[in-house]
Structures are given as C-alpha cells and as structure tokens.
Amino acid sequence: MTSAEPILEVEGLVKHFPIRQGLLNREVGQVQAVAGISFEISPGETLGLVGESGCGKSTTGRVILRLLDATAGSIRFKGRDITDLSRREMRPIRSEMQIIFQDPYASLNPRMTVEEIVAEPLRIAGRSRSVIEERVGELLERVGLDPSRRHRYPREFSGGQRQRVGVARALALGPDVLILDEPVSALDVSIQAQVINLLTDLQAEFGLAFLFIAHDLAVVRHISDRVAVMYLGRIVEIASRDDIYLRATHPYTQGLLSAIPVADPSLRGTRTQVAVKGDVADPANPPSGCRFRTRCFKVQPECEDVDPPLVPFGAEGQMTACLFPEVMNVLAISGSERHGEAE
C-alpha cells in the first residue's frame, strides 16, 4: 500500500499564536499550539493523528494546507518545500491537497445548491460548463448520492449525506492528499461506519494519502495504517496501527486506549486500567520537562527536568517520548482481533 517515497513530509513543525492585551495590543505571551512535530505520509497511506481537544491536531492540518503560516519547521509536498510559498505559488498545489471538515453543515454554504458547492472548485479552476456538469454528476454518484438531487440545498440532506457532499467537493480536482479533520465525529455511530467505508473505498480507488485527525482511537483503528498520538502540541508516540493498539508504550496512549468502551461483555473487567488524571495543561504555559507529567500515573522526579525526545522503543518503527516507557496492552480484545482477523 505504501511507497518508499513520502508524498508529505513534516519536519519540526511549530505554530504559536500570540496573546495580546491592553490598548496597544501588545504581545504578552504565546499559545504553543504545535511545538515541533515531525512525520511523513506515503501515497495510499493513512496516518491517524489522535489526541484530546486542544492538543493541536486541527492546527497541524491547517498549517500543512497553508491556511495558517508555520512559526517554524518545514512542510514538503512531493519533495517540494511549500512552507514559505506565496498565495499565488500555492494556488496550483491546493488542488492536490484538500480538506474535509468536522461539521458537515457549517462547512457548506447554505445559500448554494449541492451542484454549486461541488462545482465551485471546478469553476475556479476554469473548467468548461459541460465538463463541470458531467463531473458533478460523477462525483455525487461516486459518494453515494443521487445526482438528480443536485439542485437541492444542504439543509435538505441528513448529516451523513452532507458529509458526502463535502467529500465530493474535496475530490473535485483529483487531489493526492486529503486532510480529514474529525470527519465523522459529528455523525451517529452507524453513519460513521458508512462514511469511513466510503473513504476507504475512495482511497483504494484513487491512491489517496490521508491525514485522519480524530480524538476517538476506536474510530482511527479502522482506517489508519499508522497512528501518531499527540499531546499538548507534541507527538508522544507513533507506530503502526497494530503496535499502537496492542503494544502501546507511552502512558498517555495507554490511558486513551483504556478509555475505549468494551463491546464484548465477556471481556469486561479483563483489561488493564490506566488512568489519565486531571485536565490538559495550559498551552500558553506548558509544564517544564515532560508535558504529560502533571497527568501521568508513573511520573518520576526526572520528568520535571527532562523533556523526553521521540526515540525508538518497542516494535520496529515504533517511537515514543517517555523517560520510562513500557510496552503494555490495555485493550480487552478477542484472539481473532489480536491477530488481525477481525480488522
């Protein structure tokens, strides 16, 4: 599925937002939304980016798309550094990288018909009317919508159908990378599965690379090839999907996995419980040393002074940012799932 040559490379990415106060609007501090993260994605691969609200996941996606400028670091797309490109230079690249937002209603213009919404990128790109009309019909049919309903407005569709409209719009210009910013979190569980299956089919058909941003590890499990766990602007663990879910090494990852509900009643009470106490620290004033130490169940005095780097630990390709890592399986799963037979 994956290629040796990454299509997207992020190196040391930093994004700070200034805090301003007073009549002179002076800067008095900074919110460290993204604090030096690195990862890469290959063609056809899905990297899940997971963490609690406020950890910097969505900001990461917007900086990659250059909707926000990076404070530091670099972004390379197809080998080209796009970190400091002008708006004019970015214009042809935007057709190759698209985003699908969390709220399928707020992200669609309520004054435009579905046809107009899906056609807008094609119109801006200068496609002819006949090409646009044919392409819109193809896209709507491909995402599971009736092309005959193209003249209706978003309010006339369900949440799941509106998200399908968003998917069709994102695919209009044939992108190679999709940033999926919590694309199913606003949908019912049954609809979530349908949309995830649609995305998986589209990825296989078009060879798309996904950055799948979510806070729900249970959702990410069914679509990701690799998973990066983010906490307070940093990636604290990154590994293949199976290694994250069966051999987590960072206490934050273990806590998130421990919080996943157990579907099989016979397995309840068999998992190791790992508590993540308290709330996320203030990103404008993060803790010294390890950023997770104020909530960690295994914190030691050294954690207050040393900021642990992301280093190899555990399985091949697995990396963790912890001074005291430990391989632990905190999921209560069946034998078939353990060996990937139920994936």
Image (cartoon, grey):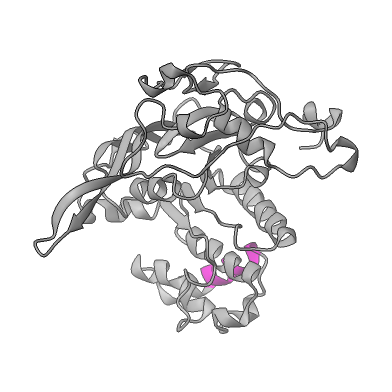
Q: Position of residue 229 (x, y in %)?
A: 52, 35
Q: Is residue 106 above or below residue 336?
A: below
Look at the image and tell me in which quarter the N terminus lies: top right
Residue 1 visible in the displayed image? no
Seen at 56% across and 57% down, the residue is 183
Q: Position of residue 177 (x, y in %)?
A: 46, 46
Read off the magenta span: 134-143
The residue at the far left in this view is: 24
User: Quadrant of the rendered structure where residue 222 is?
Assistant: top right
Q: Is residue 245 above or below residue 58?
A: above
Tell whether position 33 is magenta.
no
The residue at the far right in this view is: 266
Q: Is residue 90 above or below residue 187?
A: above
Seen at 37% across and 33% down, the residue is 287
Look at the image and tell me in which quarter the C terminus lies: top right
Q: Is residue 44 above or below residue 202?
A: above
Q: Main secondary structure of the magenta part?
A: helix
Count the numbered circles shown.
Answer: 0
Which sits in the foreground, 293 or 223?
A: 293
User: Quadrant of the rendered structure where residue 342 is?
Assistant: top right
Q: Is residue 84 left or right of residue 233?
A: left
Seen at 44% across and 28% down, the residue is 5
Seen at 84% across and 38% down, the residue is 268
The residue at the far front in this view is: 301
Q: Position of residue 6 (x, y in %)?
A: 44, 31
Residue 128 visible in the displayed image? yes
User: Quadrant of the rendered structure where residue 14 is?
Assistant: top left
